[in-house]
Image (cartoon, rainbow, N blue to C red):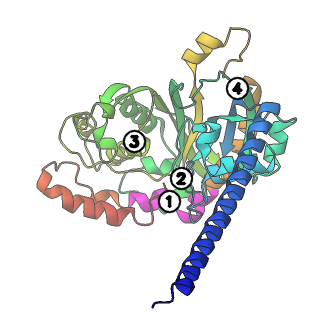
Amino acid sequence: MFEVRPLLSALLNRRLTLQENASQENEDSAEIATKRVKADGEHIEDDKKFPKKKVVLLLAYSGKGYYGMQRNPGNSQFRTIEDDLVTALIKSGCIPENHGDDMKKMSFQRCARTDKGVSAAGQVVSLKLWLIEDIIEKINQHLPSQIRVLGFKRVTQGFNSKNNCDARTYSYMLPTVAFSEKEYDARNIAAFRLDPETLQRVNRLFSFYKGTHNFHNFTSQKAPNDPSARRYITEMSCGEPFIRDEHEFAVITVRGQSFMLHQIRKMIGLVIAVIKGYAKEQVIERTWGLEKVDVPKAPGLGLILERVHFDRYNKRFGGDGLHERLEWDHEEEAIKAFKEAHIYPTIVETECQEGSMVSWMSTLPIHDFEGTASDTRDNKDKKQKNADEGNNSD
């Protein structure tokens, strides 16, 4: 006879143990869920007591040392402007801490995604936050001096700084030696002065860009027949030269509906190549066609996002009595002061010490402005890649 009782007893004990473990797991899960609901409930309760409002912030920053504007969550190796901004928003009490990991929770959107090393005097971001007292001062307390919130306005709940933007204005500050003849010794940068005739020709070339054109040659990874490569430029010109630290500089201004990656730098780079005699004037109009044209990319150091424009929004909501027009006349002095203190000195100092433009100009002879055959494209790309090493500022 088998001993049935010990076997039944063992089975019963095993069953009881499994039930106890399952019960404990259920209790642990319930406790975790309760804590999670409690945490979420606290945020929901906070939002009910202090509802977040849709606003825009006017930002100015010097891009040196940053890997562009847009944040890359989980990638702390490459610090961006938005990394420091989000940290400041949390520390100042404008947003809950969990919004820092998921920016969609605060409906965050930047108007323009500036690249590595590029600065801004009039960047605008839209987001939802708590309207704390002295909000600008408290955010700035937690920002480095090269990033500043200069303005703050309430907007409609559906406002999106990128989608509602009608146009963007950029400037590009460069040493005028960029427009010297190719025989000129560019190392003697301090002695160069731009003559009026050359400046007039520069502006005549920049005027070719005005209007709507196919800019597929002025960015990467855009097919010639891609409709998104067609962009509308309303203004592009170079201002009168001025002296900074015994070197002559000038500022190029360009306004358009929107710009593609590297587009402005390539527009400027091609004009410099023509002025210096490496390319013929006809190359500019040839870039509008379907064939591939080798277009050089000027350094990113001098590029500045000057301002963004919301004409349609202002026309629709600016006079409704509830919302302000998205214009920054009262902040103009602060914008100018920030540029004079943080942006212009950085550009001048870096250019004079590192010679970004002069170094880039030495790569112009490797470009083939006449060649368009596809079988030579790979070779030109390899040359460009080697030339860009050490000069890729964005």
Callout in the foreground (2, 3): 3
Q: Which mark is residue 301?
A: 2
The amino acid at mark 2 is: Leu
Magenta part of the chain: 349-362
The amino acid at mark 3 is: Gln
Give the alpha-carbon distance from disc 2 to disc 3, as whole Å. Answer: 15 Å
Residue 90 horizontal side relative to residue 362, left or right: right
| Label 3 crowd bin: few (<14), some (14–19), many (20+), radius 10 Å | some
Mark 1 touches mark 2? (CB < 8 Å): yes
Q: Earlier in the sequence, mark 2 or mark 3?
A: 3
Q: Earlier in the sequence, mark 3 or mark 1?
A: 3
| Residue hosting label 1 | 356
Frontmost residue, 216 versus 193: 216
What percent of the width, then of the height, locates residue 91?
79, 51
| Label 2 crowd bin: few (<14), some (14–19), many (20+), radius 10 Å | many
The amino acid at mark 4 is: Trp
| Main secondary structure type of the part rendered in magenta | helix
Callout in the foreground (2, 4): 4
| Residue hosting label 4 | 328
SS at circle 4: loop
Q: Which of marks 2 and 4 is nearer the N terminus?
A: 2
The amino acid at mark 1 is: Ser
Establish if 284 lies above or below 17: above
Q: Earlier in the sequence, mark 1 or mark 4?
A: 4
Give the alpha-carbon distance from disc 4 to disc 3, as whole Å. Answer: 27 Å
Does the rendering let one see residue 323?
yes
Q: Residue 263 carries which label?
A: 3
Q: Which residue, as the protein is rendered here, is positioned at the far top? A: 320
Give the alpha-carbon distance from disc 2 to disc 4, as whole Å. Answer: 25 Å
Callout in the foreground (3, 1): 3
Q: Earlier in the sequence, mark 1 or mark 2?
A: 2
| Label 4 crowd bin: few (<14), some (14–19), many (20+), radius 10 Å | some
